[in-house]
Image (cartoon, rainbow, N blue to C red):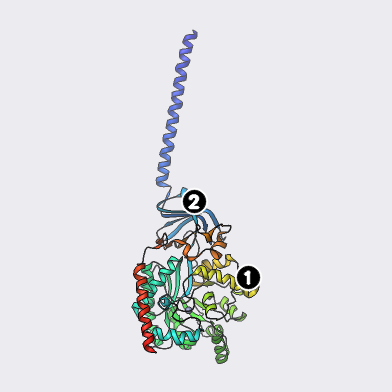
């Protein structure tokens, strides 16, 4: 073959080969684009929301904290929790919220309060419990508490709670059906107990009336996605044995929790000891009150045998450190309860003189410090245990640990974003230490409850804040006038 000819043939052959390679390459690229389009359409899972943050505190069983983490949410549930890269690769969200300079954590759980009493905030301070109740609170309630009072007071309480990162609150008050309506309007989760008490009160003349009222309330809200209706006999010292037993029976009929104040003061413990020869905890156990889900607030004056009963009966304890210190009630042996693995949550209790606010950041901080100073042991209640009480252990106290209290797939989407760009937030070495000892309720930026954003950029989306504050001031005038007229 002449050289020139062979060169032409070679060139033609090379061009043909190159063309084939080029064609093949284009085919591969087109196929891979098509594949990724098809796979993103079919394999990427839809989500309603992705929330990402610099740190995600999960409070899962391994207590995992994820740097550059994210949570995917669909409807009212958490779909997945992981690094932002993992979550972004797996899900296509309809909306997203990225907060690189913040902590994303489970919503805080309040296990004991009286939200509507916010309208009595600061009405009488610096008193012992019995004086405060009998000389101020019970008379002020008798003159002022109505369904409208409860509606505005609960709105005010829910406003403060949501802005401060509380996503579930546990309440004991009158007209609890109105509390439930106001909580649903605010978009906050509630374990809400109708009070049963042995003297005439604004919504019932007798305990029998109160039990009838409570039964209607339980029937109305028993299948609500946000509300767990409950039965709340006020305390041993305000109810007969028969009423306490009837409250338990009613709670069990509707599979509802029972909420009660228990062993709050030395006086309560001493009176029961001298009159019944039992401790308050032993008395409730003997009456069968613990035969079902129970949340007992305070449990300050409990001994080793009492704590063994609380543990064996699975009673949830609502520790209220601000209230116990302000009323000089005492300091609950929480470190010992935690050593026994009792389900202890945190509560701010009443805003009307026993605290006077709904700030779970303060309760975490104080709970940790009180146990240290009483035991002379700085490890007695570390930051991790305090945050656990405000989240997953609090959920256990309420019997809701399968639904709330941690950021885990399948749980309800209740979560908060806490900003890290203020002087009290920097520098950060340990996100859990920061949550308990440095961050404030004011640092909460965004809040989601049951998959719905209720606070965004520290502004409430569900309630009319201006109107609520104006109403609270208006009530102050009415309440002051009613007390002045009585004197
Ligand atoms: Zn209380």
Which residue carries the number 1 mark? 380
**Residue drawn at point x = 44 percent, y = 34 percent:** 29
**Residue drawn at point x = 62 percent, y = 71 percent:** 372
* Quadrant position of the C terminus in the picture: bottom left
Relative to 77, is 388 on the left or the right?
right
Q: Is residue 222 visible?
A: no
Q: Nearer the viewer, residue 482 or 112?
A: 482
Q: How many marks?
A: 2
- Residue 314 in percent (x, y) is at 54, 75
Which residue carries the number 2 mark? 84
* Mark 2 sits near ligand 1, with its Cβ under 8 Å away: no
- Residue 3 in percent (x, y) is at 50, 9
- Residues at marks 1 and 2, CA–CA distance in whole angstroms: 35 Å
Name which of mark 1 and mark 2 comes first in the sequence: 2
**Residue drawn at point x = 52 percent, y = 72 percent:** 346
Relative to 366, is 22 on the left or the right?
left
Q: Nearer the viewer, residue 361 or 401?
A: 361
Q: Is residue 93 visible?
A: yes
Relative to 76, is 355 on the left or the right?
right
Quick one: which residue is furthest to the bottom in this view?
275
Q: Nearer the viewer, residue 484 or 12?
A: 484
SS label for mark 2: helix
User: Could you classify mark 1 by the number of other residues whose Cα lies within 10 Å: few (under 14), some (14-19), or many (20 or more)?
Assistant: many
């Amino acid at each position: 073959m002449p050289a020139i000819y062979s060169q032409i043939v070679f060139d033609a052959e090379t061009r043909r080969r190159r063309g084939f390679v080029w064609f093949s390459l284009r085919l591969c690229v087109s196929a891979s684009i098509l594949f990724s389009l098809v796979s993103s359409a079919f394999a990427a899972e839809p989500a309603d929301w992705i929330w990402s943050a610099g740190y995600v505190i999960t409070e899962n069983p391994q207590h995992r904290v994820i740097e550059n983490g994210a949570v995917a949410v669909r409807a009212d549930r958490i779909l997945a929790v992981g690094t932002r890269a993992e979550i972004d690769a797996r899900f296509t969200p309809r909306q997203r919220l990225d907060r690189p300079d913040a902590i994303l954590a489970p919503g805080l759980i309040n296990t004991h309060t009286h939200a509507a009493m916010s309208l009595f905030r600061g009405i009488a301070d610096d008193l012992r419990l019995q004086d405060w109740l009998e000389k101020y609170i019970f008379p002020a309630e008798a003159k002022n508490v109505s369904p409208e009072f409860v509606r505005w007071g609960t709105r005010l309480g829910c406003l403060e709670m949501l802005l401060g990162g509380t996503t579930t609150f546990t309440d004991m008050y009158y007209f609890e059906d109105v509390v439930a309506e106001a909580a649903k309007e605010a978009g906050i989760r509630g374990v809400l107990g109708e009070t049963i008490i042995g003297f005439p009160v604004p919504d019932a003349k007798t305990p029998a009336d109160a039990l009838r009222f409570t039964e209607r309330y339980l029937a109305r809200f028993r299948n609500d996605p946000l509300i767990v209706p409950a039965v709340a006999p006020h305390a041993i010292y305000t109810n007969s044995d028969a009423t306490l037993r009837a409250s338990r029976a009613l709670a069990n009929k509707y599979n509802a929790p029972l909420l009660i104040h228990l062993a709050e003061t030395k006086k309560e413990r001493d009176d029961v000891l001298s009159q019944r020869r039992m401790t308050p905890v032993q008395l409730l156990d003997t009456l069968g009150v613990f035969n079902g889900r129970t949340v007992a607030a305070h449990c300050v004056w409990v001994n080793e045998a009492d704590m063994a009963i609380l543990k064996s009966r699975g009673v949830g304890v609502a520790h209220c450190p601000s209230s116990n210190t302000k009323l000089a009630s005492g300091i609950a042996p929480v470190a010992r309860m935690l050593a026994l693995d009792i389900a202890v949550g945190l509560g701010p209790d009443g805003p009307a003189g026993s605290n006077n606010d709904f700030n779970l950041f303060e309760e975490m901080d104080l709970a940790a410090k009180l146990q240290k100073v009483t035991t002379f042991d700085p490890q007695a209640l570390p930051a991790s245990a305090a945050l656990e009480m405000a989240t997953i252990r609090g959920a256990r106290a309420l019997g809701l640990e399968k639904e709330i209290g941690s950021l885990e797939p399948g749980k309800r989407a209740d979560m908060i974003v806490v900003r890290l760009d203020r002087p009290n937030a920097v520098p950060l070495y340990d996100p859990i230490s920061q949550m308990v000892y440095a961050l404030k309720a004011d640092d909460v930026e965004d809040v989601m409850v049951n998959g719905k954003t209720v606070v965004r950029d520290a502004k409430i989306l569900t309630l009319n804040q201006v109107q609520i504050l104006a109403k609270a001031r208006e009530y102050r005038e009415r309440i002051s006038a009613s007390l002045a007229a009585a004197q």
